[in-house]
Amino acid sequence: MLIFTIWSCCYLTNKESADVQIGYTLEYVNLCLAIYFLMIECISLAGICRGKTEWKNSTVILELLISFACPIMNLACQVIDYFNEANLDKAEWFWFWELIAWTAFVLYLRLFIMLRSIELLSPSITMILRSFSEMVPYFSIVVMGVMAFTNTFLAVRQVIYIKHAADDSIDESEKVERPFENDIEVIDFWSWKDKWMGEYIAIF
């Protein structure tokens, strides 16, 4: 996680002024660690599948997905960087930096789960994870509430926007901003996200 953080936050954003050898070292170490952890997770999964203990529950499956997601997302970031190094600073490649952010989040989440194996921290971490598990019904209600308010706010904003747009007496600086456009042309996932989920993401 530390190597990935240095590579993504310090080296990638300053490639032009960074030492090339340091960059190569970070990339190789990061690559080796990602492959190593992917192998470890595959061996661990094989052991779990052969074991007699009951493991097919949502918690274990979620942890397995996170465990596999960490090295796979890390490798994906490095492969994209290797083959598209010249394009990463272009505006249309902003999705790569979103992938970097999500990879970092998953790595921290994996670290959080791994802290349960430390004797002094395991009771606290287990308590926190159990609390989140028991709060799932509450979060479900919150999500539905946010979606309901989003629809309400969107409808109100749309009405006010239409009234302001038709009223020439209102100064441009005072007019309400147009809500996310539903007539955006969908050409990729990100434009689809802005078209159908933009307002919900903004409210969240």
Image: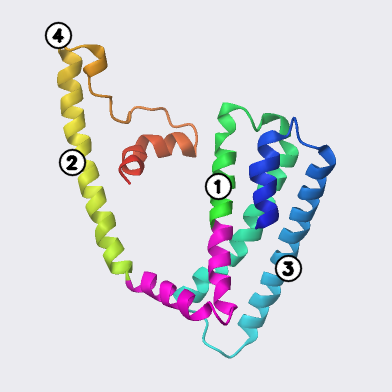
Q: Nearer the viewer, residue 192 or 76?
A: 76
Earlier residue among tags 1 and 3: 3
> For this view, does 166 lie left or right of residue 89?
left
Q: Position of residue 199 (x, y in %)?
A: 31, 38
**What residue is disc 2 on?**
152
Instruction: Kindly identify the amino acid type of the residue bearing the numbered disc 2.
Output: Thr
**What residue is disc 4 on?**
169
Q: CA distance from mark 2 to mark 4?
A: 27 Å
Task: Choose top left, top right, bottom left or bottom right for residue 193.
Answer: top left
User: Is the magenta region chiefly helix, strand or loop?
Assistant: helix
* Magenta stretch bounds: 106-134
> For this view, does 104 lie left or right of residue 134?
right
**What residue is at 20 percent from the left and 23 percent from the top?**
161
Query: Is-magenta flag for residue 9?
Result: no
Asked if the residues shown at circle 2 and circle 1 are in contact, with their CB atoms under 8 angstroms apart, the answer is no
Earlier residue among tags 2 and 1: 1
Q: CA distance from mark 1 to mark 3?
A: 24 Å
Instruction: Kindly identify the amino acid type of the residue bearing the numbered disc 3.
Output: Met
Q: Position of residue 179 (x, y in %)?
A: 28, 29
Earlier residue among tags 1 and 4: 1
Single out the residue that lies furthest toward the bottom. 52
Q: CA distance from mark 1 to mark 4?
A: 45 Å
Q: Which mark is residue 101?
A: 1
- Element under disc 1: helix
Query: Is-magenta flag for residue 117?
Result: yes
